[in-house]
Image (cartoon, rainbow, N blue to C red):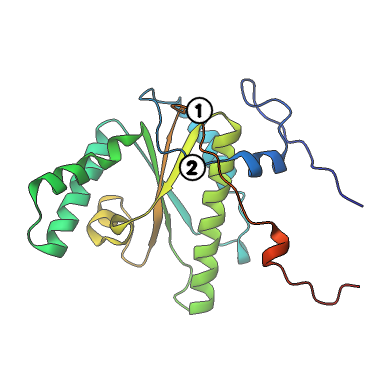
Amino acid sequence: MAIPARAIELPDGARGGATVLELLRTRRSMPRVQPACPPREVIEQVLEAAVWAPNHHLTEPWRFIVLTGEARRELGEAMARGKLAREGTVDPPKLDALRRKPLRAPVIVAVGVIPASREPEVEIEEICAGAAAIQNLLLAAHGLGLAAMWRTGEAAFDPEVKAFLGLPPAAHLLGFVYLGYPAGEPPRRTRRPAAEVTTWLGWA
């Protein structure tokens, strides 16, 4: 017997009647957003959803750095400095393109994880908790009518970028969530049925 999807409470203006399963199935990565900046109150709701992610031992290792306005340009400069430090010389057009990357959305949430321990089994659990927090963030953004895109790349592993964001060297930078109002329709996507990638053990 199938268990019906449980409706979640959404604020006014969000997708009325949406369920958790509907949000999961309809969420898409949206690379193109409008320049208008969502209100801080909406971003706060998205972050509150993120901190309810599952987390072994309740260490709450996630850290969120929210950037808008000129802070995005400063992030772009940090990305450029890091690339120059790694490679020595970079073609100016490529460097300028890198500086402009954070300007693709009006809000960026950088998500870091500070592990409670460097023991391998603990560290991987902390990273997984941070990724679960990002998934919560993405689903909440979708439910509130925002477009979101989780990006990583070289900058997510750059000490210069971590330092700019105020993260300690031991932290993991899991990436950048670009947020804004959608520009255009979400892309169409398909997934293989779960049955194709699932093994059932002990079931009749």
Q: Is residue 202 above or below residue 55?
A: below
Q: Which residue is mark 2?
A: 29
Dots 2 and 1: beta carbons under 8 Å?
Answer: no
Q: Is residue 6 above or below residue 130?
A: above
At 15% from the left and 48% from the top, the residue drawn is: 94
* Neighbours of disc 2 within 10 Å: few (<14), some (14-19), many (20+): some
At 13% from the left and 61% from the top, the residue drawn is: 85
Measured as percent of width and height from the top left, residue 23 is found at: 65, 39
Q: Secondary structure at mark 1?
A: helix
Which one is nearer the viewer's eye here, 193 or 55? 193
* Neighbours of disc 1 within 10 Å: few (<14), some (14-19), many (20+): few
Q: Which residue is mark 1?
A: 41
Q: Nearer the viewer, mark 2 or mark 1?
A: 2
Measured as percent of width and height from the top left, residue 98 is found at: 21, 46
At 19% from the left and 43% from the top, the residue drawn is: 97
Which one is nearer the viewer's eye here, 52 or 135? 135
Measured as percent of width and height from the top left, residue 152 is found at: 37, 54
Estimate the spatial distance between the alpha carbons at disc 2 and disc 1, rounded to whole Å.
22 Å
Image check: 154 left or right of 13?
Answer: left
Q: Secondary structure at mark 2?
A: loop
